[in-house]
Image: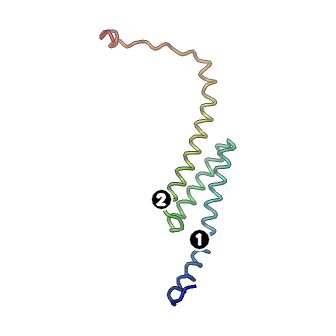
Amino acid sequence: MPVSKSAQKQVRVTERRRLRNKPIRSLCKSNITKAERLIFRGELEAAREAVVVAISSLDKAAEKGIIHPNNAARRKSRLMKKLNEAQALALAETEPKAAESEPEAAEQPSQEELDSGG
Protein backbone atom coordinates (compact mmCIF):
# COMPACT_ATOMS: atom_id res chain seq x y z
CA MET A 1 0.00 0.00 0.00
CA PRO A 2 1.34 3.46 -0.83
CA VAL A 3 2.39 5.52 2.16
CA SER A 4 2.63 9.13 0.97
CA LYS A 5 -0.32 11.21 -0.12
CA SER A 6 1.06 11.68 -3.62
CA ALA A 7 1.56 7.93 -4.04
CA GLN A 8 -2.02 7.29 -2.91
CA LYS A 9 -3.29 9.82 -5.43
CA GLN A 10 -1.20 8.22 -8.17
CA VAL A 11 -2.85 4.87 -7.43
CA ARG A 12 -6.29 6.46 -7.81
CA VAL A 13 -5.29 8.20 -11.05
CA THR A 14 -3.79 5.02 -12.48
CA GLU A 15 -6.96 3.07 -11.70
CA ARG A 16 -9.12 5.70 -13.44
CA ARG A 17 -6.88 5.61 -16.51
CA ARG A 18 -6.90 1.82 -16.58
CA LEU A 19 -10.70 1.75 -16.50
CA ARG A 20 -10.88 4.39 -19.23
CA ASN A 21 -8.38 2.61 -21.48
CA LYS A 22 -9.66 -0.95 -21.00
CA PRO A 23 -12.63 -0.83 -23.44
CA ILE A 24 -10.53 0.74 -26.18
CA ARG A 25 -7.81 -1.88 -25.76
CA SER A 26 -10.43 -4.62 -25.82
CA LEU A 27 -12.02 -3.18 -28.97
CA CYS A 28 -8.65 -3.25 -30.73
CA LYS A 29 -8.12 -6.90 -29.80
CA SER A 30 -11.66 -7.82 -30.90
CA ASN A 31 -11.25 -6.07 -34.26
CA ILE A 32 -7.94 -7.84 -34.90
CA THR A 33 -9.45 -11.21 -33.98
CA LYS A 34 -12.43 -10.67 -36.30
CA ALA A 35 -10.13 -9.74 -39.18
CA GLU A 36 -7.85 -12.75 -38.61
CA ARG A 37 -10.84 -15.09 -38.41
CA LEU A 38 -12.14 -13.81 -41.76
CA ILE A 39 -8.69 -14.11 -43.33
CA PHE A 40 -8.30 -17.73 -42.23
CA ARG A 41 -11.79 -18.60 -43.45
CA GLY A 42 -10.89 -17.25 -46.88
CA GLU A 43 -13.54 -14.51 -46.93
CA LEU A 44 -11.16 -11.94 -48.37
CA GLU A 45 -13.63 -9.18 -49.25
CA ALA A 46 -15.03 -9.10 -45.71
CA ALA A 47 -11.50 -9.51 -44.35
CA ARG A 48 -10.28 -6.40 -46.19
CA GLU A 49 -13.03 -4.32 -44.59
CA ALA A 50 -12.32 -5.83 -41.16
CA VAL A 51 -8.61 -5.10 -41.53
CA VAL A 52 -9.38 -1.45 -42.32
CA VAL A 53 -11.52 -1.23 -39.17
CA ALA A 54 -8.83 -2.93 -37.07
CA ILE A 55 -6.10 -0.63 -38.36
CA SER A 56 -8.25 2.40 -37.67
CA SER A 57 -8.89 1.32 -34.09
CA LEU A 58 -5.17 0.65 -33.55
CA ASP A 59 -4.29 4.10 -34.90
CA LYS A 60 -6.83 5.75 -32.61
CA ALA A 61 -5.54 3.86 -29.58
CA ALA A 62 -1.95 4.83 -30.40
CA GLU A 63 -2.95 8.46 -30.94
CA LYS A 64 -4.66 8.57 -27.52
CA GLY A 65 -1.61 7.01 -25.87
CA ILE A 66 -3.42 3.83 -24.85
CA ILE A 67 -0.90 1.66 -26.69
CA HIS A 68 2.57 2.60 -27.86
CA PRO A 69 2.79 3.69 -31.51
CA ASN A 70 5.35 0.96 -32.22
CA ASN A 71 2.97 -1.63 -30.75
CA ALA A 72 0.22 -0.41 -33.08
CA ALA A 73 2.60 -0.46 -36.05
CA ARG A 74 3.72 -4.02 -35.26
CA ARG A 75 0.15 -5.27 -34.95
CA LYS A 76 -0.89 -3.55 -38.19
CA SER A 77 2.11 -4.99 -39.98
CA ARG A 78 1.37 -8.54 -38.84
CA LEU A 79 -2.29 -8.22 -39.78
CA MET A 80 -1.48 -6.87 -43.26
CA LYS A 81 1.09 -9.63 -43.75
CA LYS A 82 -1.57 -12.27 -43.04
CA LEU A 83 -4.03 -10.60 -45.40
CA ASN A 84 -1.45 -10.27 -48.19
CA GLU A 85 -0.41 -13.90 -47.86
CA ALA A 86 -4.03 -15.03 -48.03
CA GLN A 87 -4.62 -12.89 -51.12
CA ALA A 88 -1.49 -14.22 -52.78
CA LEU A 89 -2.57 -17.77 -52.02
CA ALA A 90 -6.03 -17.14 -53.47
CA LEU A 91 -4.46 -15.59 -56.56
CA ALA A 92 -2.03 -18.50 -56.94
CA GLU A 93 -4.93 -20.96 -56.84
CA THR A 94 -6.61 -19.22 -59.78
CA GLU A 95 -3.40 -18.58 -61.77
CA PRO A 96 -2.40 -22.18 -62.61
CA LYS A 97 -5.74 -22.80 -64.26
CA ALA A 98 -5.18 -19.85 -66.60
CA ALA A 99 -1.56 -20.81 -67.24
CA GLU A 100 -2.47 -24.37 -68.25
CA SER A 101 -4.70 -23.15 -71.06
CA GLU A 102 -1.93 -20.98 -72.58
CA PRO A 103 1.08 -22.78 -74.11
CA GLU A 104 4.36 -21.31 -72.97
CA ALA A 105 6.42 -19.67 -75.68
CA ALA A 106 10.03 -20.81 -75.96
CA GLU A 107 12.45 -18.05 -75.09
CA GLN A 108 14.21 -16.75 -78.18
CA PRO A 109 17.71 -15.28 -77.88
CA SER A 110 17.91 -11.58 -78.66
CA GLN A 111 19.81 -10.23 -81.68
CA GLU A 112 22.56 -8.92 -79.37
CA GLU A 113 23.14 -12.37 -77.92
CA LEU A 114 23.39 -13.85 -81.42
CA ASP A 115 25.87 -11.19 -82.53
CA SER A 116 28.09 -11.53 -79.49
CA GLY A 117 28.09 -15.31 -79.66
CA GLY A 118 26.93 -15.45 -76.09
97 vs 72, left or right, is right
Picture coordinates of residue 96, whole percent (x, y): 61, 25
Q: Looking at the figure, which quarter contains the C terminus?
A: top left
Say what amino acid the circle numbered 2 marks: Asn
- Please name the residue shown 34% across and 9% down the image: 114
Find disc 1 in the rendering and name its residue.
21
Check residue 103 in the rendering and tell me which mark sits there, or answer none: none
Please tell me whether mark 1 sits on a helix, a strand or a loop.
helix
Residue 29 located left or right of residue 118: right
In the rendered image, the residue lying farthest to the bottom is 5
The CA span between labels 2 and 1 is 18 Å
**In the rendered view, would you say 30 is above or below 5?**
above
- Say what secondary structure mark 2 lies in: helix
Q: Of 100 and 9, which appears nearest the observer?
A: 9
Which residue carries the number 2 mark? 70
Q: Hey, which quadrant is residue 22 in on the image?
A: bottom right
Question: For the point 59% across and 78% down, which residue is it?
Answer: 15
Residue 8 percent coordinates (x, y): 55, 86
Q: Is residue 6 left or right of residue 39?
A: left
Q: Is residue 71 above or below residue 94?
A: below
Q: State the image quarter where residue 1 is shown.
A: bottom right
Residue at (60, 33) in percent of width and height: 91
- First in sequence: mark 2 or mark 1? 1
Q: Amino acid at mark 1?
A: Asn
